[in-house]
Image: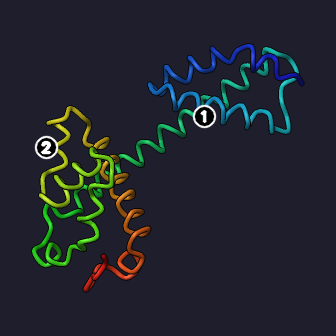
Amino acid sequence: MSTNPLLQHLDAFLGFARSRTGDPDLAEDLVQECLMKALKADHMPEDDEGVVTWFYRILRHAIIDAHRRRSTREQALEKLVHELPATMAAEDEKALCQCVMKLLPALPPADAGLLRRIDLEGESATAIAEETNQRANTLNVRLLRARKRLREQVQRVCRTCATHGCLDCDCP
């Protein structure tokens, strides 16, 4: 079976995915994944029209799965936001590794500012999201990524603190 029908309808597939995801990048990724899945499939329809219909079915299932993953991720982030304490306890603040304070400026300014406001100053992520016209879930994703970048910096600079915590840290 030739892949020509799939390639001939590529723009239509992309448009279909974009209209259902609202995200052009995600749509492109999904179409690419589905093309790979279709090319690896053991059984394909013989006629061109059947191939296109068959591919739309594969794409529709991939879009549904992507929506489910997004929904699950958003629910997990919401749960995490409610579980995390609003402010840092005094004893935790005293034990805050000075490596972290020295590494904050090395992060992108947006990440450093977000970490300072939420983790160090105790501001509400929801309030910051409203102030910056973002969805709370989007801001929480940005916060998780900023924390990951900071963690990676600590692991590069201070392996002891990254592994065993910042107890009696004497990093340069």
Mark 1 highlights which residue?
61
Q: Nearer the viewer, residue 121 or 84?
A: 121
Secondary structure of the residue carrying numbered label 1: helix
Percent coordinates x, y for residue 23 in the rendering: 46, 27
Depicted 95 relative to depicted 28: above or below: below
Amino acid at circle 1:
His
Q: Callout 2: 10 Å neighbours few (<14), some, many (20+)?
A: few
Residue 110 vs residue 20, the one in the foreground: 110
Residue 69 against residue 167 in the figure, above or below: above
Give the label on residue 52, or none. Answer: none
The image position of residue 35, as x and y in percent, is: 72, 31
Q: Nearer the viewer, residue 67 or 138?
A: 138
- Depth check, front residue: 163 or 6: 163
Q: Residue furthest front?
A: 172
Residue 148 position within the rendered picture, expressed as x and y whole percent measured from the top left:
38, 58
Residue labelled with disc 2: 127
The residue depicted at 71 percent of the width and 26 percent of the height is 55
Count how many numbered circles sit on residues in the image: 2
C-alpha span from label 1 to label 2 = 36 Å
Picture layout, residue 39 above or below residue 71: above
Q: Which residue is drawn at the image coordinates 28% and 70% (left, top)?
A: 99
Secondary structure under badge 2? helix
- For marks 1 and 2, give the one nearer the viewer: 2
Q: Are marks 1 and 2 in contact (CB under 8 Å)?
A: no
What is the quadrant of the C terminus in the image? bottom left
- Left or right of 116 on screen, residue 74: right
Among the 4 quarters of the image, the one containing residue 156? bottom left
Image quadrant in which the N terminus is located: top right
Give percent across and percent down for residue 96. 21, 73
Q: Residue furthest left?
A: 90
Earlier in the chain: of badge 1 and badge 2, it is 1
Q: Is residue 133 left or right of residue 75?
A: left
